[in-house]
Amino acid sequence: MGGWSGQKIGGYEIAEEIGRGGMAVVYRAYQRPLDRWVVVKMLDLIGADKNFIMRFRQEARAIAALRHPNILTVYDYGEEQGVAYIVMEYAPGGTLKDKLTGQPMDWPDAATLVIPVGRALAYAHSEGIIHRDVKPANILLAKPDWPLLADFGLVKLLSGQRGITRPGVSIGTPAYISPEQAVGEEVDHRTDIYSLAVVLYELLTGQVPFAGDSPIETMLRRIHEEPLPPSRLNPHISPQLERVILRALARDRQARYPTMEAFVNDLARLPGATGRAVTPPEFTSTVVMTRRLEGPPAGAGPRLVVMGTGVTITLPLRAEITIGRADPQGREVPDVDLEPHGGRMAGVSRRHARLLYGPAGWVLEDLHSTNGTFVNGEPVLPGQLVALKSGDQVRFGQLLLSFFEK
Amino acid sequence: MTLLEEGTVLQGRYRVVRRVGGGGMGWVYLAHDTRLADKPCAVKELRQDPHLPPAEQEQAAAQFHREAAMLAHLSHANLPNVYDYFQEYERFYLVMDFVEGETLEQRLHRSPQGLPPETVVDWGVQLCDVLTYLHSQNPPVIFRDLKPANIMVTPQGQLKLIDFGVARLFDPSKGTDTLKMGTAGYAPPEQYAERHSSLFRRRHHLRRHQPWLPEGLGKLAAGRSSQCPARTGRHRV
């Protein structure tokens, strides 16, 4: 069910596909009345398995009922033209999975991600909802230090409702599911405690506690083996932190924390758990103030079109737009990330250039990029501001794009 | 303007339960979103005065839409989420989170002796957090009408700023606010004087002008927030 790009569903203008999972396809879409990007997850009602349709509807209802700063907001649900769709908030930072480098992360950085997700799960549990598929791919990043729990596709309501999983069909992701979920037992909220501990283990050590050559082997290992103490893989992990992780990773759920809240509270009490200071906004100098000009008029969004692929990058409505490539840790994310458009191969620098909106319209400035910025073939010299008009060819390194003002 | 009756369904989706507020600019209703399992939502209606010249009506509609689009791009624990914006029967509607609880004004009214300092400091921290978020937008968003009646407190103790009706994007090129807005008793002097209402107002609000916040709150708040940046506040563009 590709091919929705360029079409409309429920009034949302579908742009490009950004992912697929199971039988659902995920698109980025534009909500014109509010002039913003949203995510539309679609399921083909005609070809889909009945269980899957039920789960899809259940997901929409389940997350719609949850309101938490670290849970992705659902805006709309509908069924039309043979598909069911869920409309959700768009998190521009991608998923935690994309940010994993295989390298160990410091505890304070891991804490800023895992603790809020744990609090979101504790809240979901208090509302009678278990997630059952906690993993890095389901943790979105609104900002590098602000995670959003998503994809309640496997949620199960606690209120005595029978699971909709068919017997013998274990759903979840092998590397992250709890032993009881792996063997197909009835699960409770403690399955999420285990999975979140796997995520924390992976962040801190660069690897999941149990990995096998096949999904079956991965699952069997967690049922029969103890995890390698994480401090063997990252010597900076304190004994207290290790104790908390290993307790949450206990094979027998009776030996785990009784509640997500207890687990998160223990994590939050560890030194360093308050994470890094949030950078205060720059309001100290008048220079900064005058830079912050009124943005361009709403609805008349400028855009860049990638030559060759024809992909349109809609530029955010603001007076200063940085263009570059996000680093793998997501510490520095430019407003326009050219990484998904082949930016690295084309020699785009992390902070390559920026667009500024002023009384004369849009101007482009090179930010001392390695491979240079060009407008219609002419290089943009250091310190030079080049005015752009619709149809101009802009080149960052070897990456060629067309600029359109409206 | 006539009130929507209970049971009225807007856009085939939002079923009106009752009026919960509103003022000069229009009513606010509690409604149920029938597409999302009857989740409660707040539906804000723009009241148009048919006696006004068309140009002024248009201006009011444009301002209402600006409020909607501005809020739709913001996401913070202390701000309501925006879901939808539409026009029906020549009226405009904005759909937001329904915030349970009461306004700080109502809360204060219930406690004429004042509130415990810890509660007030926690509120101050939340306010600083959300105002910092608004001011760090590009361009900055100025709320312009901060007062207890525009701040809700939920049963869980979370504050939510409501009514962005007079908020606007900061434009340094403008010398003066074109209209005198804000509320007497809470608006700083420069909002009535010649100078442009600027970010400095916020400091004024927090330090000097609000009898319900203790002296030195800014300092306290700054100390607290730098110690706990992992608070689950939503900072995002």
Image (cartoon, coloured by chain):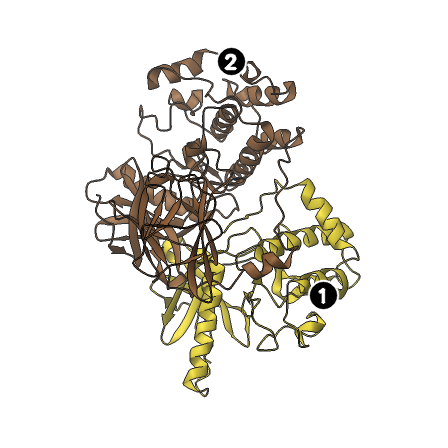
B31 or A327: nearer the eye? A327
Figure chain in yellow: B
Residue A348 in the image, given as x and y percentages of width and height:
39, 40
Q: Amino acid at mark 1?
A: His
Q: Which residue is mark 1?
A: B109
Comparing labels 1 and 2, the label whose residue is closer to the camera: 2
A77 or A103: nearer the eye? A103
As drawn, is B181 to the left or to the right of A24?
right
Q: CA distance from mark 1 to mark 2?
A: 58 Å
Indicate the quadrant where residue A154 lies.
Answer: top left
> What's the chain of the residue with tag 1?
B
Q: Is residue B7 above or below residue B126?
A: below
Figure chain in brown: A
Q: Which residue is mark 2?
A: A228
Q: Residue at x 50, y 12 (%)?
A: A226
Label 1 Cα neighbours within 10 Å, binned few <14 / some 14-19 / many ≥20: few
Indicate the quadrant where residue B174 lies.
Answer: bottom right
